[in-house]
């Protein structure tokens, strides 16, 4: 029986990840370089410990580049690209449905709370969540399962009683390792990734109601997979 849902944040609730990649790529092109998506994918949904776009820029540009200057430029470009960005389609419907179904709602994010909180306030999302697990709470972020294990503990449910909603490979692997049901909802950036082993793949949360997702997982958990 499903008792909880756990959402990723960046790229899943709000697509901050696609603008992030485009902002870095804009900087790379200013140095006559390109940032290959397969390389950048290593840090999507996790930290720069997996792949550092600042360090790599110095490598491909063939010169030492002051990270602080690039970070300021990145923040400017990224902020400009995020101005018109809202919640991804279907997010509010899922949160409302989870409340109506009396499901516990968690958030498991590799980002710090200082990054997440302004968006939760802007879109009035904080009241929906029973638990927030962020980079500030764990030793290792995704793809390590620690964020999901902490979410399960705080929500008071077992892994098989919870559904994870993820958009990135690192997040997906974290949820899968922790034993949750895995629903993947890729964004523009991550839709080309290979999410082998998911329980359900949605183009958007608008494609299927949460009640239908729960019903579908009961069928597909036994070896099947569903794509919408």
Image (cartoon, helix red, strand yellow):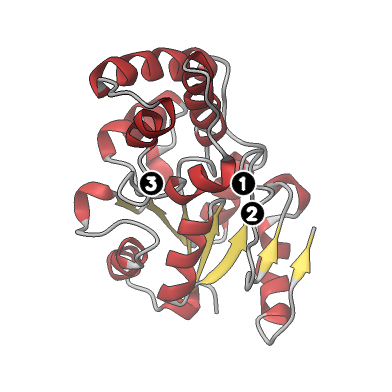
Residue nearer the viewer, 32 or 75: 32
Is residue 83 depicted above or below 202 in this figure?
A: above
Residue nearer the viewer, 44 or 185: 44
Q: In this figure, which residue is indicated by the disc labeled 1?
A: 190
Q: Nearer the viewer, mark 3 or mark 2?
A: 3
In the current view of this chain or complex, which residue is farthest to the bottom?
Answer: 222
User: What residue is rendered at 77% in x and 69% in y?
Assistant: 226
Q: In this figure, which residue is indicated by the disc labeled 3?
A: 51
Pinpoint residue 103: horizontal percent, then vertical percent: 49, 62
Is residue 72 depicted above or below 212 in this figure?
A: above
Q: Earlier in the sequence, mark 3 or mark 2?
A: 3
Pinpoint residue 189: horizontal percent, then vertical percent: 62, 40
Which corner quadrant of the image does residue 116 belong to? top left
Rounded to the nearest angstrom, the CA distance separating label 3 from label 1 is 16 Å
Rounded to the nearest angstrom, the CA distance separating label 1 from label 2 is 5 Å
Which corner quadrant of the image does residue 188 belong to? top right
Q: Are marks 1 and 2 in contact (CB under 8 Å)?
A: yes
Q: Are marks 3 and 1 in contact (CB under 8 Å)?
A: no
User: What residue is rendered at 51% in x and 62% in y?
Assistant: 172
Check disc 2 and report its element: helix, strand or loop: loop
- Give the number of marks: 3
Which corner quadrant of the image does residue 105 belong to? bottom left
Pinpoint residue 89: horizontal percent, then vertical percent: 67, 37
In the picture, measured across the screen, residue 44 lies left or right of residue 67, that is right
User: What residue is rendered at 35% in x and 69% in y?
Assistant: 152
Q: Earlier in the sequence, mark 3 or mark 1?
A: 3
- For disc 3, the neighbor class at 10 Å (few under 14, some 14 to 19, many from 20) is some
Q: In this figure, which residue is indicated by the disc labeled 2?
A: 193
Q: Quadrant of the N terminus?
A: bottom right
């Amino acid at each position: 029986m499903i008792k909880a849902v756990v959402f990723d944040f960046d790229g899943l609730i709000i697509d901050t990840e696609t603008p992030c990649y485009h902002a870095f790529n804009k900087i790379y092109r200013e140095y006559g370089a390109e940032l290959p998506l397969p390389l950048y994918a290593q840090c999507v949904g996790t930290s720069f410990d997996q792949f550092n776009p600042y360090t790599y820029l110095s490598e491909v540009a063939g010169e030492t580049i002051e990270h602080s200057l690039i970070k300021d430029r990145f923040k400017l470009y990224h902020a400009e690209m995020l101005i018109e960005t809202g919640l991804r389609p279907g997010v509010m419907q899922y949160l409302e449905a989870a409340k109506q179904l009396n499901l516990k709602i968690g958030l498991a994010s590799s980002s710090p709370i200082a990054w997440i909180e302004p968006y939760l306030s802007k879109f009035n999302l904080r009241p929906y969540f029973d638990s927030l697990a962020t980079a500030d709470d764990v030793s290792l972020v995704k793809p390590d399962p620690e964020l999901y294990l902490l979410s399960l503990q705080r929500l008071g449910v077992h892994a098989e009683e919870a559904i994870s909603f993820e958009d990135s490979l690192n997040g997906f692997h974290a949820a899968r390792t922790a034993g949750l049901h895995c629903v993947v909802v890729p964004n523009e950036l991550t839709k080309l990734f290979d999410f082998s082993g998911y329980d359900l793949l949605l183009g958007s949360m608008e494609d299927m109601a949460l009640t239908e997702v729960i019903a579908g997982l009961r069928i597909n958990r036994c070896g099947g997979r569903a794509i919408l």
